[in-house]
Amino acid sequence: MKTTRREFIKVSSLGLGSVALAGGGFSLYKLFEESSHRGLDISKLKRYPTYCDVCFWKCAGWTYVDDNNKVKKVTGNESDMHCRGRLCPRGTGGLGMYYDEDRLKTPLIRIKEGGKQTFREASWEEALDLIATKMKEIKSKYGAESFALLKHGTPGKHFEHLFKAFGSDTIAEPAFAQCRGPRAVGFKLTYGAAVGSPETTDIRDSKCLVLIGSHIGENMHNSQVQEVSDAIDKGISIITVDPRLSTIANKSKYWLPIRPATDMALLLAWMHVLIYEELYDKKYINKHSIGFDQLKEHVRKFTPEWAYPITDIKPKLIRETAREMAKASPSVLVHPGRHVTWYGDDTQRSRAIAILNALLGSWGKRGGFYFSEKIKVPKYPHPHYPKPKWKAKDLNEQFPFAKTGITTEVIKASVPEEKSKYKVKAWMVAGTNLTQSVPNKKMTLKAIESLEFLVVVDLMPMEITGYADVILPECSYLERYDMIRSSGWRTPSIALRMPAVEPRFDSKPAWWMAKQLGDRLGLGEYFKYNDYSEVIDWQLKKMGTSLEEMKHIGVMNFNRRGRDLYLKEGEDYKFKTPSGKIELYSKQLEKMGFDPMPVYEIHNKPPKNYYRLIYGRAPMHTFSKTINNPYLNDLKDTNSLWINPSVAKIWGLKYGQKVWIKNQDGKISDFPIKVRITERIRWDSVYMVHGFGHNNKKLTRAYGKGASDSEMVTKVLIDPLMGGTGLRGNFVTLLLENPNKIVES
Ligand SMILES: Nc1nc2c(c(=O)[nH]1)N[C@H]1C(S)=C(S)[C@@H](COP(=O)(O)OP(=O)(O)OC[C@H]3O[C@@H](n4cnc5c(=O)[nH]c(N)nc54)[C@H](O)[C@@H]3O)O[C@H]1N2
Ligand SMILES: Nc1nc2c(c(=O)[nH]1)N[C@H]1C(S)=C(S)[C@@H](COP(=O)(O)OP(=O)(O)OC[C@H]3O[C@@H](n4cnc5c(=O)[nH]c(N)nc54)[C@H](O)[C@@H]3O)O[C@H]1N2
Ligand code: SF4
Ligand SMILES: [Mo]
């Protein structure tokens, strides 16, 4: 690996330089892919199909291995629509997940030694026996339901099967209430359908793309970035609304540096212009929607002049951008965003985005939103799951539109003093670093303290593993089979992930752990296979292919069998809403006592000397999980705090100076963060990339590098519709001296 690593360092400095020059992840992308291929003759290598696990876009690719079974590189699969033959910088750096020497190497069990707690190495037999015993014990004491599964990604899916067989559907993941839940609910309420993942956004053929915060290019979802890049070449007009000049804002025709937390006012003003200037798609609205008259009345007073003092966006610019969208209609996309849990009124903001798209006639239209199609993977036979007495979603009673588990509600149900309908006593955590990804860490730690048992399945010694009773080391995605990836897309497609090499150390795949536990719990009927490849082969044969064939091609694309990609001229279409129409006015919301049409809510402003903490992605990292990756860490090993020059002047800050941050509740960052003084951020906000500031020393590259935005999120703005946890209601001030030192002296 030595030579590859040396080459990587060279590449990384090159890549970073180019980002600085071109101001964006778009160029980094190309460079990274090209340079990582340099000097390696792949024709001599064996290759195995996989789909990437560095983020959840799941790009299909190939893992290349030499004659000594050394993994040499991962590349994109040419036939795959998620990646179109090219992995993003993170995907290319996925090798680092395999090669990271800090990886968990063996099962670990917490013990007490001389009055102190520590972990000791254990055999798989011992660790699995202990977990199975605890699962049985918890089940007989409190019922299987009180053993919760908190998960994210593919490992979680295998344990989901185990938990359901065991009798627990107390299952939740941060992808809902901390990520795209409000979007799913907002679009479902309006169109009867969600935009899914990958999103059904037809960026490729769009003439105008409106991005509300969504920072594509830093948010590096592969084919989406490529489609934007192509659309830019074709002259797409982009309107970016962001308090920060993001990479994409820099490439946009319009950048609207909005005052944070006021997007709803802008959305309403845009609707006002479209309706009162009669720019909306009348035919589409008449044919497909209900509630237009109410909407028209509702937005009458929301003029651009009304929105100006709220948003800081000039009326002329609001009108001009609304006209720009109308000009492109229906090939226009107001992007629904993805991480949308911002200010607690997020489902309503998503509704506003959905309604704006309806006014532009873009749902079901080329260049707007297309109808995706997916292939169902046949279920491998197993007995019915037992019916649990209660499920995670029963903890959500006060959130009528949450149809799935909410991580924070499961956590709350684990704290004895907190009110909740049912109680949770034990957790399995798989593939989620809860203390970094779920806000209000204090509550999470309180829950953990009260648990009778905690198992963590992870690849790395992340923060969450430090709290476990038992740690199970999963092998990386390059070393394992997983479920078939079936994607809803313009055309259906499937992809295979298979091991390219044996697992390093004493790590194992999640499917194997789930089966072993199932067998120990007397649930063998649910796991009637010796190797997961048998399940995959069975499923693939039912789908008209086989494991053998998929090993050669990696990806199979199918023809569409269902409806057309777009609505035809004059087509009658029944939306899956109660009325069968696009619901501009929502009776469903009204019935439950919520605003049937989105309204603007005033959110707190920063107190004096405090700034709103906003955060986002860096193109070369995924959340907290890649910070220790040797290759990606080479590209970016710390984050910085973006501060406007006028603010820097008040504080007398110099570029690169280290500061500590303190939030409105007195929470101080564990580590200092370097200041980046830039006009690219508004004066009322500071910005940082999420995922840094690791405090587990076992992460040798990531420990103590940069600060954690998650630690600062102590105030959570809950979405009353679906329990989403708005994370952007926190304000920070700066500490120029080391506060920890002051305490010590
Ligand atoms: N490289 C990389 N790419 C990723 C990921 C990753 O970890 N790394 N994660 C993936 C996942 S799971 C998700 S959910 C997506 C998230 O990606 P997005 O949905 O694009 O992210 P957001 O966090 O919603 O948006 C961040 C942007 O919002 C701006 N912003 C902050 N406050 C406001 C505001 O009040 N109004 C407006 N208009 N803008 C505001 C910030 O300045 C920043 O530019 O990214 C995906 N892509
Ligand atoms: N403050 C703040 N909070 C956020 C966000 C934010 O931007 N700021 N973003 C939110 C969003 S959009 C999302 S989607 C969530 C993401 O939340 P998470 O998915 O929890 O993200 P990570 O913190 O990266 O945790 C992933 C965990 O999976 C482990 N892992 C990696 N590979 C494997 C594997 O192969 N097997 C197993 N078993 N484990 C593995 C990693 O080591 C890590 O511990 O966070 C949300 N929370
Ligand atoms: S977008 Fe990048 S990190 Fe995500 S799956 Fe694709 S290649 Fe991997
Ligand atoms: Mo997310």
Image (spheres, rainbow, N blue to C red):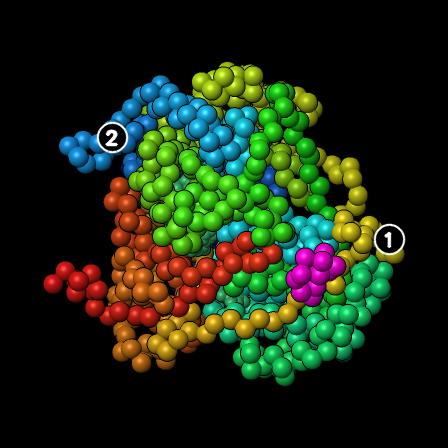
The image shows residue 369 at horizontal and vertical percentages of 70, 54
Left or right of 531 on screen, residue 6: left
Quarter of the picture containing the N terminus is: top left
Q: Residue at x 53, y 54 (%)?
A: 724
Residues in magenta, as a range: 586-597
Tell me the CA gap for discs 2 and 1. 67 Å
For mark 1, does the 10 Å Cα neighbourhood hold few (<14), some (14 to 19), or many (20 or more) residues?
few
163, 413: nearer the viewer: 413
632 over 452 or under it: above or below: below
176 over 259 or under it: above or below: above
Left or right of 151 on screen, residue 601: right
The image shows residue 108 at horizontal and vertical percentages of 30, 29
Does the numbered disc 1 mark a residue whose Cβ is under 8 Å from ligand 1? no
Disc on res. 571: 1
418, 439: nearer the viewer: 418
The image shows residue 572 at horizontal and vertical percentages of 86, 52
For mark 2, does the 10 Å Cα neighbourhood hold few (<14), some (14 to 19), or many (20 or more) residues?
some
Magenta-span inclusion, residue 593: yes
The residue identified by callout 2 is: 111
Three-letter code for the amino acid on which mark 1 is drawn: Glu
